[in-house]
Image (cartoon, helix red, strand yellow):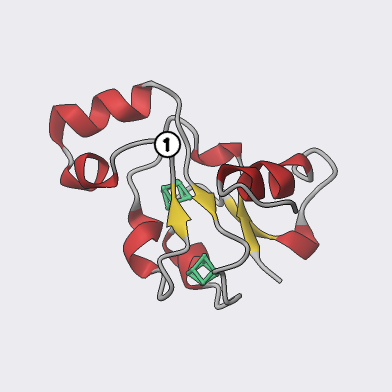
Amino acid sequence: MAYVITDLCAGVCEGECVDSCPTDAIDGPLDLQVLLGGGPAADALRKSGVQLYINPDDCIDCGACVAVCPTQAIVHEDDLSPSQERFRGINAAFYGLEA
Ligand code: SF4
Ligand code: SF4
């Protein structure tokens, strides 16, 4: 079982969830060092509309990332709404996996 990041992260993400994860299961199509560094460079990344994704093979279902997410973007795969369901596959696909 795994958690899934939905599009509520897109354009907002400041990466709070990254350091909360004990298995380094969260990554994305951007430079996390720049994102976590803050300032204008991180702002520019966010404005590009990117979001982060959870690797379902590495997620241990601990829920730690949920507690730090300011946008409720992280949802357990069992609790995805119909409109959020597609993000199960989108998260897995980022890591070259099938949901
Ligand atoms: S639920 Fe736990 S293991 Fe899974 S991505 Fe979040 S912090 Fe990492
Ligand atoms: S804490 Fe939430 S909004 Fe911030 S990067 Fe993580 S999933 Fe995205």
Residue placed furthest toward the right? 82
- Report the quarter where the N terminus lies: bottom right
Residue at image x 42%, y 36%?
29
Q: Position of residue 37 (x, y in %)?
A: 16, 45
- Relative to 31, 23 lies left or right: right
Residue at image x 18%, y 29%?
41
Residue at image x 66%, y 41%?
90
In depth, the one of 69 and 19 nearer the eye is 19
Q: Please tell me whether residue 64 is drawn above or below residue 9 in the rendered image.
A: below
Q: Position of residue 42 (x, y in %)?
A: 23, 33
Q: Report the residue marked by disc 1.
A: 29
Instruction: Give the SS element for disc 1.
Output: loop
Q: Position of residue 70 (x, y in %)?
A: 44, 51
- Relative to 21, 7 lies left or right: right
Q: Please tell me whether residue 49 is drawn above or below residue 52 in the rendered image.
A: above
Residue placed furthest toward the front? 96
Q: Residue 89: which quarter of the image?
A: top right
